[in-house]
Amino acid sequence: MADKSYLDAVAILEGKEVRALFANRMCTLFVILGSLLILFVAWPLLRTVTASGPAVLWQTLLDEEVRGSILLTFYASLVATGLAFVCGVPLAYLLARADFTGKWLVEGIIDIPIVVPHSAAGIALLMVLGRRTLLGQAFGLFGLKFVSATPGIVAAMLFVSLSFLVNAAREGFEAVDPRLERVARTLGASPWRAFWRVSFPLAWRGILSGMILMWARGISEFGAVVILAYHPMVAPVLIYERFESFGLRYSRPVATLMILICLATFVALRVAAGRKTMNNAQ
Amino acid sequence: MNNESMNNESMNKRGMGSYGSVQVRDLWVNLKEFHLRKVNLNVAAGEYFVVLGPTGAGKTVLLETIAGLHQHHKGRIILDGEDITGVPPERRGIGFVYQDYMLFPHLSVAGNIAFGLKLRGIGRSVIEEHVTSVSQLLFIDHLLHRSPGTLSGGEQQRVALARALVVEPRLLLLDEPLSALDPGMREGLQRELARLHRQLGTTTVHVTHDFEEAVALGDRIGVVNEGRVVQVGSPEEIFRKPDSEFVARFVGVRNIFRGEVRPGDDGYQVLSLDPSADGSTGSPQGSGQHGVEIAVVTGLSGQVHGSIRPEEIVIAREPLHSSARNSFQGRIVNVTDRGTVVYVTVRVPPDFTCVITRRSLEEMELREGLEVYIAFKASAVHIF
């Protein structure tokens, strides 16, 4: 792997790969069209990041409210990802291995959060977890309240992002030949141990990338969170609030900070995940 | 050599190959793609039993059911007199080797072999000892630190065998273990399977679609078709006396002999046929007490099987002077008309069956009782 990426790098330096991109007119046109899209994403991000100087960013970071909301965002999304891991990995395994009547329905339900507007998802959650609902009151007995509280943020993030983890984990399990589990069984492994020693480690790459994706999706969630819990403010809500109350200039540094932190985190996680699975493959 | 024999001793001391007999009684399995219909099998302790049948005959399902990997079936499976029908696979003590190895890709070769031992909570030093001895037995001790993905097919299959054998199964199930290998590897590993069985004596059920593999390895063969066992018998019985149209067709008309290969001159080897094993009942003529000797080309030596396809044998009325190294005189004992082609059996002895066109038969005026000459090239004899 290392050799290959080294060779790739050499090829790019020598311009071989770039020349291949412009091999004919069709490819050239495709490069132009594709570049428009890349630019559409990269340009605004770059503008935002470069608009605020380091001094302003540092000032923003010292702001208690900003720091608190960024930490809250990361924490809530992590809890949501953890919950989805506990229940979603078993579900993903079942979906990958078992054929049952109504499987299409389960698969559909898992995918629904991707297609509904997230503000609608927030309303739907409010109907079930609100103060005067059965579930809301039941949880209230344990001191757990969702509306305008961290559990509400977690619930909203979980709802809108669990599809990513379940689907990625499911693909991970599907790539594991069930006969590997069968061999493990004949060697003396109970179903439980065959899962932990064979299926889970082999699907881990898929599960991990699903978790990263889900965590990222949770962090960026606005619509569902804002309906369930405007306060305490997660970073996306804070950015919105500052924009509404004080305008672009005040919301920009927070946005910049959020973009930078997210980019750094995800690059780091991707690299770590990639290295880990590469070691496993050797 | 010395190393190997020491090794075997330690394997035997561990009681490897505690023999288990298997009975399959009235087994019915209904899966989406495959069915087994009232399968009955009796495999004696220490026996090498080959299940032979075309692709899609339900052979893999049969093995997986014996191993306990398919729950939904009717019938009983009895191992060593104990009914194990309801016992989960991890408590059956049945080893399983798949055609495509199914090594755990996230574990090293040593980790793969140690997998079953670790589950038993055995101490690390004992595990290491067992892994070392089984890997020496299979000549893979130099591969222990490699990752399965970097091994050749033959090496992977040896690792899969080691992984199954190290936990001392009562029964070893092999699902087309040689089919994924290229021909050279295949022959080597086939010999290896025979040697392992001689040394360890583990009761083995081996599934294949390859008739020659079945003949070379099986003490007995069970032919299956469409989820049923259609004939069980020794290899000789199966190809001499196929008791159904299907078996006859699947096995095909062929000349199969047992004998011993020894080096000859001019780069050829000589196969001396066992006079007793050819199955012909005619009075010995010409060759007397000695078996017929055939020039062959092979890298193998010792006790082997040789087969010659009927279309490789030429019949002539006069002695032949040709490039074919093998030429014998014999008498036609049977002529079977199959439409456009005719099967002619010539007793040398043993009996050789040749296929010729009806037109050749008529032009040469061949008939039963006629003295003729047959010839075939040394390279036309497949030794296995």
Image (cartoon, grey):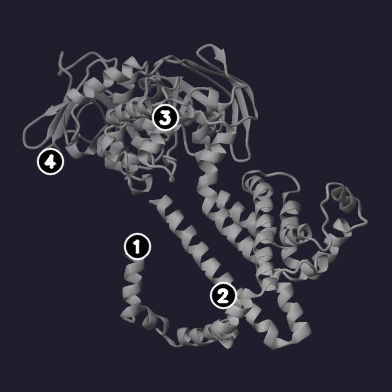
The residue that appears at 39% across and 26% down in the rendered structure is B165
Comparing B27 with A32, the one in front is A32
In whole angstroms, how far apart are the C-alphas of marks 1 and 3? 34 Å
**Counting other residues with Cα less than 10 Å from the Cα at mark 4, is it few (<14), some (14-19), or many (20 or more)?**
few
Q: Does B364 sit above or below residue A43? A: above
> Which SS class for mark 1?
helix
Residue linked to disc 3: B164
Looking at the figure, which quarter contains the C terminus of chain B?
top left
Q: Is residue B165 left or right of residue A88?
A: left
Disc assigned to residue A2: 1
Among the two numbered marks 1 and 2 on one chain, the one whose residue lies closer to the N terminus: 1
Residue A252 appears at what percent x and percent y?
65, 83
Residue linked to disc 4: B322
> Which SS class for mark 2?
helix
Mark 2 belongs to which amino acid?
Answer: Leu
Q: Does B79 sit above or below residue B378? A: above
In whole angstroms, how far apart are the C-alphas of marks 4 and 2? 85 Å
What is the quadrant of residue B69 in the picture?
top right
Mark 4 belongs to which amino acid?
Answer: Ser
What is the quadrant of residue A145 in the picture?
bottom right
Comparing B222 with B358, the one in front is B222
Q: Is residue B54 left or right of residue A77?
A: left
Residue B338 appears at what percent x and percent y?
40, 35
> Which SS class for mark 4?
loop
* Badge 4: chain ID: B
